[in-house]
Image (cartoon, rainbow, N blue to C red):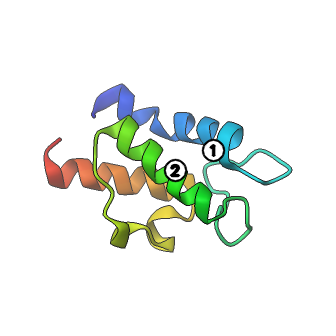
Amino acid sequence: MTGPTLDALGERLMSFINSEVSTAPTPIELETDLLLTGAVDSLGVVRITQWLEDECGLGVDPLDVTLENFQTVDRMVSYVKQKVETSGA
């Protein structure tokens, strides 16, 4: 996954979270704290992880599912970019 596909990942991920996962009364944005605000619960994290794996063709190590990597959409996109760079995918 590279180029425009990776560049648009944040928008696609926000759309997925807003339509399928979020419990927040208002739409989430790139910097919305998904976990500490309760906008996404533990099942939501599992659904997001599965979506990222399906969408990006990358395996997400359960040990990588941390606040550092999954607190915001921006952090998730950075995580995926790092995985792509290190895997050569």
The residue under the point 35% across, 73% down is 63
Q: Nearer the viewer, residue 43 or 84?
A: 43
In which quarter of the view is residue 43 placed? bottom right
Q: Which mark is residue 34?
A: none
Q: Which mark is residue 17?
A: 1
Most extreme residue toward the top, as rendered? 4
Left or right side of 81 for 74: right
Most extreme residue toward the front, as rendered? 43
Helix, strand or loop status at disc 2:
helix
- How many numbered circles are shown? 2
Residue 16 position, x and y percent, is 60, 38
User: Is residue 71 shown above or below 60?
Assistant: below
Most extreme residue toward the right, as rendered? 25
The residue under the point 27% across, 34% down is 1
Which quadrant would the C terminus be assigned to in this image?
Answer: top left
Left or right side of 18 for 66: left
Residue 6 position, x and y percent, is 37, 35
Residue that badge 2 annotates: 48
Mark 2 and mark 1 in contact (Cβ < 8 Å)?
A: yes
Residue 5 position, x and y percent, is 37, 29
- Answer few, some or many: residues within 10 Å of disc 2's Cα (few below 14, many 20 plus, some between 14 and 19): many
Q: Amino acid at mark 1?
A: Ile
Going from N to C along the chain, the mark reached first, 1 or 2, is 1
Left or right side of 28 for 51: left
